């Protein structure tokens, strides 16, 4: 399947930046490897690579901002019950079709009990929330002592605004037009402090798409692009850390 033509992409409804209704409008794009959300597939694979095998029978992984459940295929065989939390009903229906226990809720007020999760993933969601302290606090609250927090998001830098908005919105599969509000991009030092305040020591590392894989994709040779280490956290970055044991 070819990448979605620019003329077709430009016909997407203009709902304003970071409007959740965009996800309903683009619901048919979620599971297309060369669709509007192509890069989310690449990031889901990179996120899942940080998740170890379940530490115990019945272990729970809570996927905040789960969307249509793109993380699910990469967790097969790891032994978790995959619980996804999102606000978008159309995305949750797709997630449920892929084996996710779908829960409708705001990541700033997660409708789950304290300490229920062995792993919490917050992938490509923190740059969309208007209240970052609330979202980080909730991610840490539902995590068990000793549990693992995995995040990936976009840094609050000029370079990130150039790459993730100005450039990415012009590249098929990189980012739908208007999907991000750069005013919500994440200050890295602030994120580290918020996690520490909630009992999680988190380490950050930069990531980027493999340039070789992108060239192959654009040439029509393959659907996937690996995320590889980047020398800086100033655009895309991952964070991983464990909650202090009590």
Image (spheres, rainbow, N blue to C red):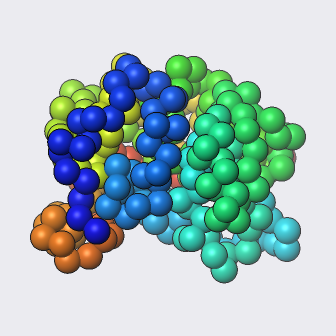
The answer to whether 209 is drawn above or below residue 166 in the figure is below
> Looking at the rendering, which quadrant does residue 156 occupy?
top left
**Would residue 50 be found to the left or right of residue 171 on screen?**
right
Q: Is residue 151 left or right of residue 102?
A: left
Query: Horizontal and vertical percent for residue 19?
Result: 47, 25
Q: Residue at x 56, y 61 (%)?
A: 71
Q: Nearer the viewer, residue 235 or 190?
A: 235
Residue at (32%, 70%) from the top-left corner? 224
Q: Give the image quarter of residue 73.
A: bottom right
Q: Position of residue 215 (x, y in %)?
A: 13, 67
Q: Is residue 56 left or right of residue 236?
A: right
Which of these two is toward me, 204 or 79?
79
Q: Identify which residue is drawn at 16% across, 64% down.
A: 218
Mark yes or no: residue 49 visible: yes
Q: Is residue 96 above or below residue 111?
A: below
Whether residue 163 is visible to the viewer of this picture, yes or no, is: no
Residue furthest to the bottom in view is: 77
């Amino acid at each position: 399947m070819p990448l979605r033509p620019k003329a077709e992409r430009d016909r997407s409804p203009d709902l304003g930046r970071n409007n959740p209704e965009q996800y309903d409008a683009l619901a048919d794009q979620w599971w297309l490897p060369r669709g509007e959300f192509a890069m989310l597939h690449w990031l889901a694979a990179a996120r899942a690579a940080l998740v170890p095998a379940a530490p115990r029978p019945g272990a729970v992984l809570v996927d905040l901002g789960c969307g249509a459940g793109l993380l699910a295929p990469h967790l097969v065989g790891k032994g978790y019950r995959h619980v996804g939390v999102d606000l978008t009903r159309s995305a949750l229906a797709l997630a449920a079709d892929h084996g996710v226990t779908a829960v409708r809720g705001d990541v700033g007020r997660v409708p789950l009990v304290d300490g229920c999760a062995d792993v919490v993933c917050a992938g490509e969601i923190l740059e969309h929330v208007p209240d970052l302290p609330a979202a980080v606090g909730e991610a840490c609250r539902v995590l068990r002592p000793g549990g693992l927090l995995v995040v990936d998001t976009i840094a609050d830098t000029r370079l990130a605004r150039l790459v993730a908005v100005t450039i990415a919105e012009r590249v098929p599969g990189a980012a739908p037009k208007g999907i991000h509000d750069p005013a919500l991009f994440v200050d890295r030092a602030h994120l580290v402090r918020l996690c520490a305040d909630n009992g999680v020591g988190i380490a950050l590392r930069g990531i980027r798409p493999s340039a070789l894989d992108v060239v192959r994709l654009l040439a029509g040779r393959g659907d996937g692009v690996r995320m590889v280490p980047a020398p800086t956290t100033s655009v895309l970055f991952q964070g991983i850390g464990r909650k202090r044991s009590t």
